[in-house]
Amino acid sequence: MILMIVRKSKTNWGENMTNTIIRLWHGELEPSSYTGMNDPELMQLERLLQRNGNRLEECLDEKGKALFEKYFNCIEEYITVLCEQSFCNGFCLGTRLAAEALLTQE
């Protein structure tokens, strides 16, 4: 099956693969799970972010709080897009490695 995919035109293959990977990332094809949620280092960082964000917010006036919220939302969106792109890139790389391994066996 992978050999059939590899033989398609690269442009069409890349676009279809990217759409499929994005759908996979968003859980549309198979529920995705984030295995890092139980990682102690990530949990510690999340606590630090929350604590420091709360402390910063306490020091701000209403205008500062509104600006901080916009900044936080922008960072959150950036991280979401970055993670999605990293997932797609990693998936493409893994698929390319698998396809090359299958092609070199012939």
Image (cartoon, rainbow, N blue to C red):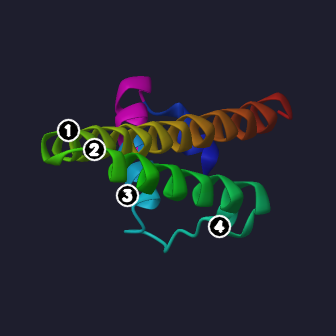
Q: Amino acid at mark 4?
A: Met
The label number, if any, that marks residue 60 in the structure image: 2
Which residue is located at x 27 percent, y 41 percent?
68
Whole-Å distance between the Cαs marked 1 and 2?
Answer: 10 Å
* Dominant secondary-structure state across the stretch colored magenta: helix
Q: Is residue 5 magenta?
A: no
Which residue sits furthest right?
105
Whole-Å distance between the Cαs marked 2 and 3?
Answer: 40 Å
Left or right of 10? Residue 73 is left
| Figure quadrant of residue 81 | top left
Which residue is located at x 41 percent, y 41 percent?
18
Left or right of 95? Residue 30 is left
Residue 7 percent location from the top left of the image: 53, 32
The residue where tag 3 is placed is 23
Pointers 4 and 2 in contact (CB under 8 A)? Answer: no
- Estimate how packed mark 3 is, as few (under 14), some (14 to 19) or many (20 or more) residues with alpha carbons within 10 Å: few
Q: Amino acid at mark 1?
A: Leu
Residue 93 percent location from the top left of the image: 65, 33
Pointers 1 and 2 in contact (CB under 8 A)? Answer: yes
The label number, if any, that marks residue 67 in the structure image: 1
Q: Nearer the viewer, mark 2 or mark 3?
A: 2
- The mark tally for this picture is 4
Disc with the residue nearer the chain's start (1 vs 3) = 3
Pointers 2 and 3 in contact (CB under 8 A)? Answer: no
Q: Disc 3 on helix, strand or loop?
A: helix
Is 8 located above or below residue 11 in the figure?
Answer: below
Q: Is residue 12 magenta?
A: yes
96 or 61, nearer to the observer: 61
The residue where tag 4 is placed is 37
Which residue is located at x 64 percent, y 41 percent?
95
